[in-house]
Amino acid sequence: MAKKPFHLAWFLSQGYGPKSWLSDWPGSDLARWMMPDLFIDLAKGLDRCCFDYMIIEDSSMVPYTYKGSHDTYLQYAASTPKLDPAVLVPWLAQHTKHLGLVPTLSVTEYPPYLLARLVNSLDHVTEGRVGWNCVTGSNDGAAQNYGRDKHLPHDERYDLADEFADVVTRLWEAWEPDAVVLDRETPMFADGSKVHPIHHEGKYFKVRGPINAPRGPQGRVPIVQAGGSPRGQQFASRWADTIITDGGSSIASMKEYRDTVRRKAIENGRDPDRIKVLFLAYPIVDTTMDAARERRRLEQAGSEKLMERELSTMSRLTGIDFSRFPLDEPLPELTTNGHQSSLARWIGKTPRELVRTMTSKDGIDFTGTPDHVAGMMQEIMEEVGGDGFLMFNAHFDRRYIMEVCDGLVPELQRRGLTRKAYAHKHFADNLMEF
């Protein structure tokens, strides 16, 4: 039986910010972290080994949840600073040919028209390689930067996102594909009968339209979503073309998550094969099993020294100050208006054990030689059914890029598990190729 290939993507965890400044291989340009050089090197590697896309995570604040202060976040460069991901996209596009480029843009921080226009512009200048990571915002600190005291309740944020996505996708399609005529004789640049206002008036937004630029190469660009809560999954099953998830810490829970998403897609009248569910994976690969395991051990030991960095990130995601809890006592039942699916996995575990597993997203331990890790990925995808992996390393360096792009992925390609060449020009078409 022919193997079913799976997709690969990269999650730029902690966004467009400092990455390797505490690494053993920090590079020589620590003070120039805001320049795109390291990210260009990453994108070129991903393009070379045929990843579908790279998501640039983002948040729009200097957090202050942990200990009620921003000091810890700034001390460790944890969740801040971050530059705007949309600025990075054209740089990466210039240095790659096929890789999909997906900035994170929040529905609670942009008006729909502004976001639709920005993404449409990026789709044009990347020649059809942009996507949109649609997020709803989670920390009230960001809301306070945009004129509100706090975010809407969790589920209502998704009600707003439903309306937002409807407006944005209609704006992207407001120009018919053949509206631009470019007839110099008549003259006629665009045919006005093929450009349409949307006249939207809803609960949250009022938008006339049309967008003031032609339809982008992809029309409606691929939408990426990471909703883990029941309401988030419902939103994703309606709008997402690809979903990012850790799917829990076992193969069974990964399969259950994917099956649930596919069932909900059918309920929404969608073809479930057109939603690619990618599972987060943080591989550590080295030339021998012992070397890889030693690196994982050193990293987990190092996480104890950086305990506050990890706890502060957990605090930002949930709006809960984790400095309040003893390190070695199980967390009590807690509620959040932030990342509900993350918090649900943490309840009942101690902060210390959570910090130890935070580095691997509390998931399956992909540690070993390229052959060993590729074999694990193959077996997992065969059991789960698809659709691929979303690799990440919040503090990657150039050595790590090479280990993944020139060590692990060639082994996946040798086994016939991932693509060796891109079949299409546009991101959306490569995503739906298999």
Image (cartoon, rainbow, N blue to C red):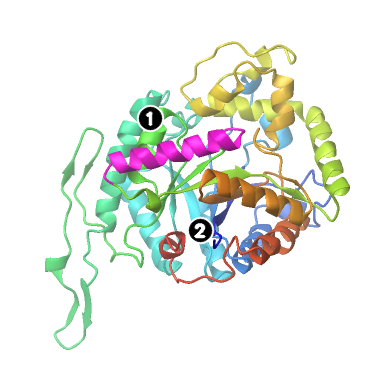
Q: Kindly indicate the quadrant of the structure image that contains residue 42.
A: bottom right
Q: Residue at x 49, y 54 (%)?
A: 102
How far apart are the two marked residues, 2 and 1, measured between alpha carbons? 26 Å
Relative height, residue 296 to residue 214 (above, below): above
Which residue is at the front of the view, 61 or 420? 420
Residue marked by disc 1:
231
**Tag in front: 2 or 1:** 1
* Residue type highlighted by circle 1: Arg
> Alpha-carbon neighbours of circle 1 within 10 Å: few (<14), some, or many (≥20)?
some
Residue 167 visible in the shown view:
yes
Q: Residue furthest left?
A: 193
Q: Residue at x 82, y 29 (%)?
A: 305
| Label 2 or label 1, whichever comes before in sequence order | 2
> Disc 2 on helix, strand or loop?
strand
* Residue type highlighted by circle 2: Leu
Which residue is at the front of the view, 189 or 287? 287
Residue 169 position in % (x across, y down)? 29, 52
Q: Residue at x 63, y 65 (%)?
A: 49
Q: Kindly indicate the quadrant of the structure image that contains residue 371.
A: bottom right
Residue marked by disc 2:
101
Say whether residue 351 is left or right of residue 298.
left
Residue 341 position in % (x across, y down)? 51, 28
> Disc 1 on helix, strand or loop?
helix
Which residue is at the front of the view, 27 or 368? 368
Say whether residue 280 is left or right of residue 208.
right
Relative height, residue 68 to residue 179 (above, below): above
Give the magenta range.
248-269
> Alpha-carbon neighbours of circle 2 within 10 Å: few (<14), some, or many (≥20)?
many
Relative height, residue 255 to residue 103 (above, below): above
Dominant SS of magenta comes to helix
Give the label on residue 142, or none. none
